[in-house]
Image (tube, grey):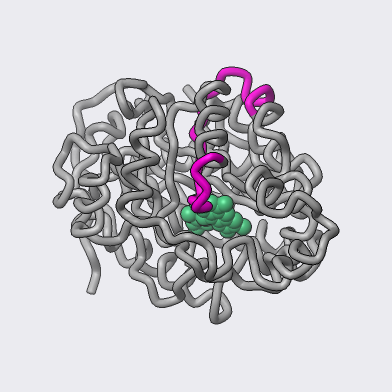
Amino acid sequence: MHESPDTLWLSLLDEFQRLERQAEKILDPVTFQFISSGPNSGLGVQVYLDAFRRLRLIPHPLPPGGDSDLSVTLFDTTYPTPVMIAPTGFIGRVHPDAELALAGAARARSVPMWCSTYTAKALESVQEALAGTPWWYQLYWSGNRDLTRELLRSAEALGSSGIAVTVDTGPIPMRPAAMIAGFGEQLASDPVQRVRYPDPSGASAAGARTLSARSPQDAMLDAAALEWICESTTLPVLAKGVLSGDSARRLLDCGVRGVVVSNHGGQLLDSAIASIDALPEVREAVGNDVPVLLDSGIRTGSDVVKALALGANAVLVGRPCLMGLAVAGEEGVGRVLDDLLWDLRVVLAGLGGGSVAELEPTMVRREP
Ligand SMILES: Cc1cc2nc3c(=O)[nH]c(=O)nc-3n(C[C@H](O)[C@H](O)[C@H](O)COP(=O)(O)O)c2cc1C
């Protein structure tokens, strides 16, 4: 049986809030704002957290078993947990170890990790820290095919399990104050920015700093670009940032082999639908055989169970890992993951035991 943690940081929402308050004391205000809120004082974050609270679980007697089985299968690969670390960029200011700390915590628990296009550490070093733990590469479309080919080749060579193309950001500058702070420091190390601004101290880089990494003049990701990306890699491609059945189907038509239901953690549109509310429609639209992942608002074991019961194959966790990273580096991320996985087992046991594969929509009811 899995070891019970000494104290639970995360089994309840208020545990996460305590961690967030600790992070606020440690980080500079702009960095804290960047990892904690979204537009309009984090309205979108609140909306998606509330959406999880409106869902209630209905215990069903499941076939009795021993320890609960958390494993899930995606693209013929079995992963030991349905919980994965979400890709988050510009986190060099959150902790000096940045992705290396995330990777170390992921490796120690065999939790798959997603790497942002905007890593603070070289992808090679992150892959080394993962030491064989499965990982996925998240790709932002820059409009530059040579650069994209280079990024895809490097993800393939370093053993990525797949590519997630983020489709929800478009040309919107993301909260300039927070982005500028991280962006300035990353101009030199980030592969995308290195190509765009070979001289990080030059005038055009300085101009870019006042906008964001994604300015309106950047090429939009359209169907042709997405088809090209899917044809340009041997790896399975997922589209990250899907919130309707229609768009999921259109993305599949472009060649993606799975989708991530996500509102980008409420960072972009404060009025976007909560991903957990969009999930049933997306699952219905793509059928049972297409991998569907979900993020935006996973804080507790119940949240994971609700997402899996409503049709997700796996979930990604963003901010909780970043708060753990801010407070205690790799150890902090590890405690967040341990507590979340422990809480997941407790909730599964409360539902009747068994494996995550047995979760189904009838176990969730929406309160008015
Ligand atoms: C600070 C921060 C940076 C992020 N950077 C990226 C990124 O580089 N690429 C991406 O696809 N999503 C990015 N996201 C979105 C996350 O991958 C994910 O969708 C979101 O954080 C999940 O919601 P949660 O934080 O409530 O778990 C970022 C989110 C945050 C909070």
Residue 188 point in image, percent of width and height: 78, 48
Residue 312 point in image, percent of width and height: 29, 44
Q: Quadrant of residue 213?
A: bottom right
Looking at the image, residue 310 lies above or below residue 355: below
Q: Is residue 265 left or right of residue 336?
A: left
Q: Residue furthest toward the bottom? A: 40
Looking at the image, residue 193 lies above or below residue 6: below
- Residue drawn where x is 36% and y is 65% of the image: 274
Which of the two residues, 68 or 272, is positioned nearer the viewer here?
272
Residue 64 visible (yes or no): yes
- Number of callouts in the render? 0
Span shown in magenta: 127-146
Residue 15 visible (yes or no): no
- Residue drawn where x is 40% and y is 77% of the image: 271
Which of the two residues, 159 or 27, is positioned nearer the viewer here?
159
- Residue drawn where x is 71% and y is 35% of the image: 122
Q: Is residue 244 left or right of residue 322?
A: left
Q: Residue furthest toward the right? A: 201
Which of the two residues, 112 or 179, is positioned nearer the viewer here?
179
Q: Determine if the magenta segment contains residue 138.
A: yes
Q: Quadrant of residue 272?
A: bottom left
